[in-house]
Image: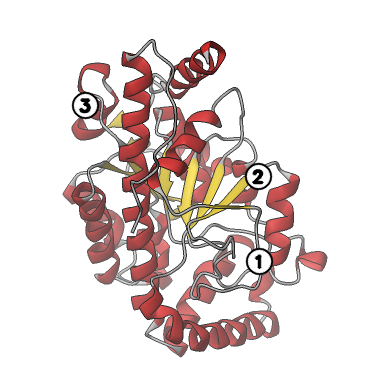
């Protein structure tokens, strides 16, 4: 019991991180990271704004994501690179600037920024916009001390990767950066079985937010693939995160199925995904690196406009779940800080719904 308490206290200390001095924090994020006014935080990416959705739909979704996090008790921290500064938490005019990059995607000057791109984008200085990918967002969230991040889907192993070697940097990041990513699995254009294999190789724990352990397939709840761990409870998820910080330097994937009312259309969307992937191969787009995903997402929106609504529903639902778990994680950490008594994770009843 004493040892358990000591370990939990060490975990809480490990989860408390001083933000890197080069980061530009919004007032709300700075307050949430300050010990006297500490509050639960959820990081949000910005490539969904700059490259994932058309204008002005992208701005609506960005605003809804932030409001969803607020409505469920946490502080949103949308992350982006603007004018040579890494921003953690954006003001309204900054969100609008990101969104306007997508007015005409053929002239979109925003740069998709993963870990490898961050320094180069910042070096370009004033006038430069960088939309952070899952990888880039994880790096900056960890530098700020934010433990939870909500997105639509992670990158993964692309179809045909055995010949192209196109494997997302998101997977490498998950293997080395201790941030919990709430998503609906890999993006639908990817090879899910191989993505799960790579995550296992990199030591990334994958937990489904359902009772069965079946891994979601982005636009549908069912992939036919199962992972060892499942849980639909906020306190259980939060306790996993507390205990995962005992020196473990890898991320966590919490795979959250799309809301059930979108499951039926999901099967139709998946057929269009497969068509878009075939077309990308035929046109040689599949060999264009980070241009592939935006091209496929744009083509899917042309083939089946309903995919936008499904995409919105799943990412908003992920933000909701992430905020609920962030609130519970904050409570557990505060309990550990305040108490010298043994902390038990019994009586789980704080259901994520």
Secondary structure of residue under mark 1: helix
**Horizontal and vertical percent for residue 53?**
37, 69
Asked whether 156 or 39 is in front, the reply is: 39
SS assignment at label 2: helix
Q: Report if the CB atoms under discs 2 and 1 are less than 8 Å apart.
A: no
For label 1, count other residues whose C-alpha is less than 10 Å away and answer few (under 14), some (14-19) or many (20+).
Answer: many
Label whose residue precedes the other's in the sequence (3 or 1): 3
Q: Is residue 110 above or below residue 273?
A: above
> Which label was assigned to residue 280?
none
Residue at (40, 75) in percent of width and height? 260
**Contact, CB < 8 Å: mark 3 with mark 2?**
no
Tag 2 or tag 3, which sits nearer the N-term? 3
Q: Nearer the viewer, residue 65 or 343?
A: 343
338 displayed left or right of 252: left
For residue 128, say whether it is visible: no
Tally the marks: 3
| Residue 216: x %, y % from top left | 54, 67
- Is 123 placed left or right of 292 in the picture? left
Residue 312's place in the image compared with 237, above or below, is below
Give whichever of discs 2 and 1 has the lower sequence position.
2
Question: Residue 111: percent from the left, percent from the top?
Answer: 46, 53
Camera-nearest label, 2 or 1: 1
Quote the CA–CA distance across marks 2 and 1.
16 Å
Check disc 1 and report the residue beneath it.
192
Of residues 189 and 256, which is closer to you in this image? 256
Identify the disc placed on residue 31.
Answer: 3
- Disc 3/disc 2 C-alpha distance (Å): 31 Å
Residue at x 50% of width, y 52% of height: 231
User: Mark 2 — residue?
Assistant: 172
């Amino acid at each position: 019991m004493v040892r358990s308490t000591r370990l939990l206290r060490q975990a809480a200390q490990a989860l408390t991180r001083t933000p890197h001095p080069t980061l530009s924090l919004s007032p709300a994020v700075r307050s949430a990271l300050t010990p006297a006014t500490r509050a639960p935080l959820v990081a949000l990416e910005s490539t969904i704004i700059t490259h994932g959705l058309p204008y002005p739909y992208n701005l609506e979704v960005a605003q809804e994501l932030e409001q969803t996090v607020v409505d469920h008790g946490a502080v949103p921290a949308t992350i982006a690179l603007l004018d040579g500064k890494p921003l953690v938490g954006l003001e309204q005019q900054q969100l609008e600037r990101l969104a306007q990059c997508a007015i005409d995607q053929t002239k979109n000057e925003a740069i998709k920024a993963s870990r490898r791109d961050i320094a180069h984008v910042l070096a370009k200085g004033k006038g430069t916009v960088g939309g952070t990918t899952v990888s880039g967002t994880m790096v900056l969230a960890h530098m700020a001390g934010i433990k939870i991040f909500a997105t639509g889907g992670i990158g993964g192993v692309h179809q045909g990767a055995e010949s192209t070697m196109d494997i997302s940097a998101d997977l490498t990041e998950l293997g080395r950066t201790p941030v919990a990513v709430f998503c609906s699995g890999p993006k639908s254009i990817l090879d899910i079985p191989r993505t799960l294999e790579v995550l296992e190789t990199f030591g990334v724990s994958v937990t489904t937010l359902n009772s069965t352990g079946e891994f979601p397939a982005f636009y549908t709840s069912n992939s036919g693939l199962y992972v060892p761990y499942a849980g639909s409870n906020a306190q259980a998820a939060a306790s996993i995160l507390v205990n995962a910080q005992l020196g473990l330097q890898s991320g966590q994937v919490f795979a959250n199925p799309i809301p059930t009312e979108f499951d039926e259309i999901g099967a139709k969307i998946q057929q269009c995904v497969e068509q878009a992937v075939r077309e990308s191969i035929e046109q040689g787009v599949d060999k264009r690196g980070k241009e592939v995903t935006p091209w496929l997402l744009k083509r899917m929106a042309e083939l089946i406009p309903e995919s936008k609504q499904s995409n919105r529903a799943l990412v908003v639902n992920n933000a909701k779940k992430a905020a609920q778990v962030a609130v519970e994680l904050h409570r557990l950490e505060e309990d550990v800080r305040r108490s010298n008594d043994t902390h038990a994770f019994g009586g789980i009843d704080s259901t994520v719904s």
